[in-house]
Image (cartoon, rainbow, N blue to C red):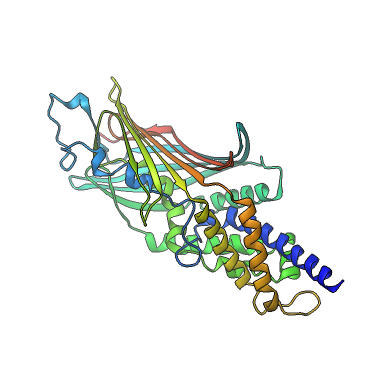
Amino acid sequence: MKNKQHKNELMKKISLIVMSCIIACGLLANHGIVKGGEMSPKVEDTVSIDKKITDSQWLSNNSDTLEVDTAVEDSVVNVVAYFCKGDTCEYWINENEWKVNGKDTVKTLDVSTQVRLVVNDSTSKGYKMSYTFLDVKADSVGDNFRDKMMAMIAERTAKSVIGSTINFETDEYGRITKITNLSQIKKQAKALFKANMEDIAAMPIMQAMKKAIGLDFMKIGNQANTDELVEGYLEELKLLFACHGNQYAVGEHHEHEDATKDSYANDTYINASLEKDGNYTISCEVVSVIPKETVKEVMGGLMGAITEGLKGKKIEDGKDHDGDIKDLDDEFKKEIDKAVDQDAQTSEYLSVTCFEDGWPSSVLKQNKTVMAGRGKLKQKLIEVCRFAQREK
């Protein structure tokens, strides 16, 4: 009887921990807390598309100087900024997420943020610019606890940065070379992440988990990688200038890479096109296969972080958790072995369209992770909404 009762309590703990993992995977990974050590490798950190799109193998032989022979100018795309002091361009960043189940998709996140780019100074060596968050609109589209929590965090994050400005510099081609107020951005990113984690930890369901199994959610949040948090602030800005300073051969290209110790097996597809009006588009897709063993390893690392928060804690009857942790680990591994029985596939897509003068007109970035036909699709669409007259 006691063994049966112990097993029931153990399974109750397992179910709560699995729920914690689902919440943590969905929330904390998006805030960049997953880092080296026991929580590596990251499932979403496959081959970097930002690196791929600027890889020298895709570029023209003239890409170092961006000089083009008129005889071949129709066969290359130069991504160069021809900006003027006083140029002002505003964009809407539309962020959406969908659950994927076979051919069916259900939207779970819909947040839009308005930003403004301004050229504050222009010299022969480059540009001094500013990037300001102006407005945010959010729709509640999720129908379950996790989706609603994700929407709440996304909306809060977006609203909290309204009015904030990132100051940066570029070279003469438009490549970002420096974030001039980086220390201020780091402080703001850390403060915002801490506030979000405190909000999550204070939720009734998280308090119930803490009471039932001693889960210390704030302890998990303390593993945050500050550099990754800052990257979350800078992501859309960097996407707008992802291709600047490069020269691409017009046409479609494909490359396959086998798995190495640093990357998963992947295929890269890149395309550069030039329109008659001078506008151009650079697109790149990287498809990676993640072994099921790696997926299990990531979830196991998260489990380790959670059980670490249980050590020394008391359950409702006053007993320690420490004696149950090994049993929890063993049972959790069995459950993961059942759930993860196939390799996962991720697809990352980036498309950048610019006007003839190098101002980005639209950027589309998509991340899709699918295992056994089920997964998630994340999309960011950046579109120009207003361009102010430049100074003459």
Pick the quarter of the image with the C terminus.
Answer: top left
Foreground residue, 45 or 78?
A: 45
263 relative to 31 in the view: left or right: left
Q: Is residue 383 above or below residue 224?
A: above
Residue appearing at x 60%, y 62% in the figure: 197
Q: Is residue 51 above or below residue 223?
A: above
Residue appearing at x 51%, y 53% in the figure: 161
Q: Residue furthest top?
A: 276
263 relative to 372 in the view: left or right: left
Asked if residue 12 can be seen in this view, the reply is: yes
Counting from the top left corner in percent of width and height, residue 370 is at: 54, 42
Counting from the top left corner in percent of width and height, residue 48 is at: 38, 48
Q: Is residue 154 above or below residue 351?
A: below
Counting from the top left corner in percent of width and height, residue 342 is at: 55, 46
Q: How many marks overall?
A: 0
Residue appearing at x 62%, y 47% in the figure: 151
Counting from the top left corner in percent of width and height, residue 382 is at: 45, 37
Quarter occupied by residue 13 = bottom right
Q: Is residue 78 above or below residue 44?
A: above
Pick the quarter of the image with the N terminus.
Answer: bottom right
Asked if residue 242 can be seen in this view, the reply is: no
Quarter occupied by residue 10 = bottom right
Residue appearing at x 16%, y 38% in the figure: 61
